[in-house]
Amino acid sequence: MSREYPIISVTGSSGAGTTTVRRSFERMFQREDVHAAMVDGDAFHRYTRKELHRMFREEPERKDELSHFAVEANLLDRLEGLFSEYGEHGTGQFRHYIHAEDKQKIEAGYRVGTFTEWQSLPCGTDLLFYEGLHGGLVTEDYDIARHVDLMIGVAPTMNLEWIQKIDRDTKMRGYSQEAVIDTILGRMDDYVRYIQPQFSRTHINFQRVPTVDTSNPFEVQDIPTDSESFVVIRFRDPSKVDFPWLLAMIQDAFMSRPHTLVVPGSRMSLAMELILAPLVRHLLAQRRFR
């Protein structure tokens, strides 16, 4: 962990809602005048979409082996190297993965499913912010979690996570529902092996729980709204949390366990602001300027 160059990691599965959390942090950084180096976990995939499709045609048996969750399908040595270098020196290399919604980069000539060139992080940043799949990963070969100062997990209930992924990938990325379901099922083993264990290492988990029927996530349906859900917030170290203050500030919030706060889904943004902004200020206050 670094004090002079802190690292914040938001980790969660594809479709879990990490992008929503990222946007909350971006608004917070702007309001607090924090200059953050923003890093997208998808940029550390090993293969372009075209390369993956070609490999699957030639070796169909590798389709499950090379899900984006898998170690083999990602440049985790470069990701850990970035975290290590940033923690020591505030520098490092990153790039972008092009999604269908990245209109500006597509207009600049990049193709969906490819990467931009590697480039240096901007100089003089206050912290590094990572959002992606592997921000808390620990394996025999990699220990990415040890470099992170504040780790946030985003893990909706499983059925809700699948509903959100199906909705996003069909409406925004042009996939058929059948193709998205096939992807979900094909990488289930990697999800259990590499993604879920990270939520036991996070400092805080945000888990959205719907209050409507999501029994069959593969049935075409609308995503439950914020007002149709609660958010379960688990703190790894409850001794550092002022729960009476949070309960007073967030209407209709309650405690379900000594380390767990539950808030209405419509108040998730408020809860994130109240919980995370002081933690970011604390990280920056601890920086050791040379």
Image: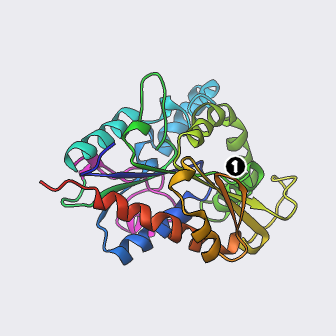
Magenta residue check for 108: yes
The location of residue 17, given as percent across then percent down, is 60, 59
Residue 95 lies left or right of residue 181; in this view the side is: left
- At 38% across and 54% down in the image, what residue appears? 96
> 138 and 96: which one is in front?
138
Residue 264 lies left or right of residue 27; in this view the side is: right
The residue indicated by pointer 1 is 180
Check disc 1 and give the amino acid type.
Answer: Val
Whether residue 111 is visible here, answered yes or no, is yes
> 262 and 29: which one is in front?
262
- The chief SS type of the magenta part is loop
Choose top left, top right, bottom left or bottom right for residue 80: top left
> 67 and 208: which one is in front?
208
Whether residue 75 is visible here, answered yes or no, is no
The location of residue 204, given as percent across then percent down, is 55, 52
- Residue range in magenta is 91-120
- At 44% across and 48% down in the image, what residue appears? 41
Quadrant showing the N terminus: top left
- At 33% across and 43% down in the image, what residue appears? 83
Looking at the image, is 33 positioned above or below residue 242?
below
Please tell me whether mark 1 sits on a helix, a strand or a loop. helix
> 148 and 161: which one is in front?
148
The location of residue 19, given as percent across then percent down, is 53, 61
Looking at the image, is 54 positioned above or below residue 247?
above
What is the crowding at mark 1: few (fewer than 14 residues within 10 Å), some, or many (at least 20)? some
- At 36% across and 65% down in the image, what residue appears? 281
Residue extending furthest toward the top: 140
Magenta residue check for 162: no
Looking at the image, is 213 positioned above or below residue 42?
below
